[in-house]
Amino acid sequence: MKLSLHWLKRYVDLPESPEELDRIVTGTGLEMEGIEDRKARFDGIVVGHVVTCEKHPKADKLSICTVDSGSGTATVICGAPNVAAGQKVPFATEGAWMHTLGFRIEKKAIRGIESSGMICSAKELGLNDDHSGIMVLPDHAQTGTPIAEHLGMTDVIFDIGITPNRGDALSHVGIARDLAAVLSRELRIPEPLSAATVTREHVRVTIKAPTLCPRYSAAIIRGITLGASPAWLKNAVESVGMRSINTVVDITNFVMMEIGQPMHAFDLSALAGPSITVRDARPGEGFVTLDGKSHVLPPSAVLICDDEKPVAIGGIMGGANSEIRAGTTDILLESAYFNPSSIRKTAKLLGVSTESSYRFERATDPERTMWALRRAIDLIIETSGGLCTGTADVYPHPDPARVIDLRLRTMDSLLGISIDRVRATEILRALGCTVIEGVDVLSCTAPTFRSDLEREVDLIEEVARIHGYDNIPTPARMEISTEEQYDDEAFLSELRSAALSLGMDEMVSSSLVQHAHAQLPGEHAVVSVLNPVSADRPSLRTSLLPSMLEAADRNIRVGVQSMRLFEIGSIFSAQPSELENPKHHEGFQFAFAITGLAQTREWFGESRPYDFFDLKGFVHSLLEKLRMETRVRFSSDAKNALSKYSWRLKQRAVPAVASWKFQDTC
Amino acid sequence: MQDAITQLLDEVRARAGRLATRDDAEDFRIQYLARKGRIATLFEDMKALPPAERPVAGKLLNALRVEAEGIHAAAVASIGIAGAAHAAHLDLTLPGRAMPVGHQHIVTKTIDEIKTIFKAMGFSVATGPEIETDWYNFQALNFPPDHPARDMQDTFFIDDMRLLRTHTTPVQIRVMEQRTPPIRIIMPGRVFRNEVISARSHVQFHQVDGLFCDAHVTFADLKGTLVAFAKRYYGSALKYRFRPSFFPFTEPSAEMDITCYLCAGKGCRVCKQSGWLEILGCGMVDPNVFRAVGYDPDAVSGYAFGIGIERTAMLRHGVDDIRLLFENDLRVNRQFI
Ligand SMILES: [Zn+2]
């Protein structure tokens, strides 16, 4: 998720340096996947003052300018038609890297006159496509100010990975809360003006599916003018990677990115009236979402309906039939809480994932729907005009408060460090818990936005996380164990060492193979996966030999002519009868192949190809190394099973291939 | 005639032990085996015998020739090889007869290296099946059905009961079911994820999981053990950090990073400019996992960890494409010694 530093600073005071922020963010358990320092794009570009401007003696279209960059003046050749003495301009000084152009500003002679620096157009700054002339700044711009600062382009954008347990962190306020706790600073959450709500009309909300939709809040705003968003709003939504659409859509997105509550705006004129019913989808019921796709709804889906028809799939996407569009003046605004697992199930079955479904399936805060609604009403009226004429809020069975006791001694014995009561209380309060301090126990009420806090151990983790894992000691000495040691793999390890010591090269191949490579003549039935990544490798190997022959073939093709290969790995087969339990058999196999020359032609002797007796000798040596008194009988039964693969090796026959199962011995 | 043959045989045998140099052997050959040598002379003499005596003499002479030839051949061979040291005309720069050398695969080798360190710390080695049930792979490890945590591990299903394990962590459930604490095990093995095969990810890879549970096991013990492991494996000078993370089967959960040893923490392509390399995931065993195997979470605590083998091996050997590890190109495999 993308987050803006400017935006975060609305809620908590933060250090400036991106490196310092990276350290703090990572320390709270949020994964920093990327940091983009927007102002870095403008390094070396400042507000310049054009002191003089004269025509170039050898070129009509060029001007020779003297530009004051605040730390000295420079002579610059400029080709723009609109450059003039007295202007304030964006000025790239010598050494600045121009991202849009892909070069560094260097001193160079243009038609015999040395130029050091560049006066930039808006396009060259990457601001927009205007390249008709240089960008002229207002006269009050302070000469020498970095251009990023002058333009307000100083934001730092973080890309943060959020683990699935932290639905509360999918917003700026959520992240700011963690940072405030770590830094022991105040968290400032804006309080919406309830005065914006003038209740004049009745909004009827009926929840017929209270399990799937425990809470539904709605508001009517009439008389708005939809338009392009003001700069602050446009910058905010674009800074986090969203497209600015219009004031109302941008505000719903802004509130979602602010507090984590997804919202939806319906065009009121497309509804049968100011009335919403929330119900289960009927078997086989269809719906067309606003992206134009039609869906057949699964039973887990919840539908938002007016008095006549469904208008949205709750928590996932609105309908094409009620989307706001140019000319919309009246809207119905939705702010609801949906059951996380039913949203997840529905989204999966529909094959749809939206910003809304992503948040609802990770649990939003049921107590925040009205806050978000009021916040959105304020901002819509501020940006689009209009009046809120009515609200509704239905929450038939509020969740009971989750009270969890944290025993301090239990915490100490799990973490291996003593964290005192004062510190633990401070951390838990900063994270939104209500804490009643006892002698040995902190009685905590978990905040409604932290559905993941259910047990004592969850609170212990929160305290440890904010206190800092680095502050938990790392003992340099440890007691040693006196228990009996065992090794389930001891035999396989011994087998591997024996084969290596006899000069065999180990290979490791894929368990998932082509069906034809698993369905070997005379072997058992094949176990396959239902959802293979590639349709041609769906089956679990029943023998290591096909992969081994493939590997031998590949090596021969690239010029490795002689090899002695072995592999130890699991093989699988289905039981012939479906009724049997277990339904499959899984065991280890040892396979090997030798091909090429046992000896190349040398001064001391002629070349000799491997033959069956090398294989036989290898088997005997291996058994001797393993001190196994097994009598081995060689037969040619395996030949049939392998003949179908021998073509793979072109003209070269592999004279010696074998495998045997050690299931009974290991 | 027979006496002459017996006498010559004694003489040949007597010289057998005294053929120390190439000249001795050549002298022996000329004296006895050459076309005009003493054995050939006896064959000539035999023609003068009465026909009835010839077969017996012929047989004896043949035996004499075979033995003399054998003595000569053995002497030449032993002078040629063992005598090389004082035979100035033997070319010592000729290639030797190479013995075949077996190369261990980088994946099993890495597992062995990690096993060795933990075995020295008292851990046993436990294994389990690659085809698992939803219970062992997910539910017993505190992944509820329909929870987004399941999206962390894309799964291959065999039917609605069986799947290919996505981690070796289910082995800890199987071991805890069979045994009572203290349990101190590592669990190496192959795991599967339903992901598109690329340079960075494969449908199969290997893990070594670890578990220690007993009364009073702490997060500090976890840190101590894993730092000891990392210092043995990556060198005692390493810098490390533990940062909070999330795994359904541990609480608190952490990931362990070490300073990127390629850039010494300055930031490079391999560490994605962060200066840190993630080496393992770990945490304290979640009480729900203990409940699933019938342990009392108030009486037992424990830590668990998991190390990705391919990632570890690739970082260590500078391999940047995981697919190379399963292609078994011997030109590549033989480089990792
Ligand atoms: Zn690095």
Image (cartoon, coloured by chain):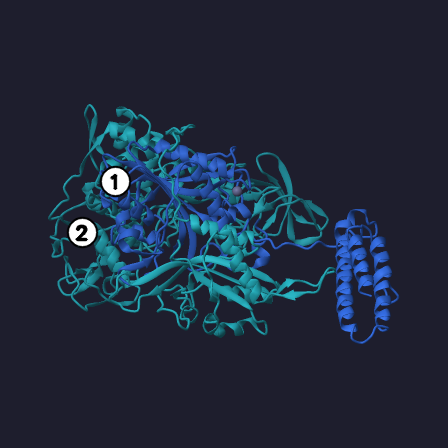
Chain colours: A cyan, B blue
Q: Is residue A611 above or below residue B185?
A: below
Q: Which residue is mark 2?
A: A218
Give x and y (percent) for residue B171. 33, 48
Left or right of B275: which side holds A414? left
Q: State which chain disc 2 sits on.
A: A
Crowd band around label 1 with a 10 angstrom C-alpha radius: few (<14), some (14–19), many (20+): many
Question: What residue lies at 29% left-to-right and 59% top-to-bottom?
Answer: B162
Question: What residue lies at 42% left-to-right and 28% top-to-bottom?
Answer: A477
Give x and y (percent) for residue A130. 50, 54
**Tag 1: residue type?**
Pro
Q: Residue furthest bottom?
A: B51
Left or right of A149: which side holds B134? left
Who is closer to the viewer here, A260 or B335? B335
Q: Which residue is mark 1?
A: B287
**Tag 2: residue type?**
Ala
Who is closer to the viewer here, B217 or B84? B84
Residues at discs 1 and 2 both on one chain: no
Give x and y (percent) for residue A524. 36, 69
Q: Is residue A417 visible?
A: yes
Please tell me whether mark 2 sits on a helix, a strand or a loop.
strand
Who is closer to the viewer here, B154 or A443? B154
| Number of numbered discs visible in the structure rendering | 2
Left or right of A438: which side holds B274? right
Question: What residue lies at 31% left-to-right and 64% top-to-bottom?
Answer: A291
Q: Which image quadrant: the N terminus of chain B? A: bottom right
Crowd band around label 2 with a 10 angstrom C-alpha radius: few (<14), some (14–19), many (20+): many
Q: Is mark 2 within 8 Å of ligand 1?
A: no
Q: State which chain disc 1 sits on.
A: B
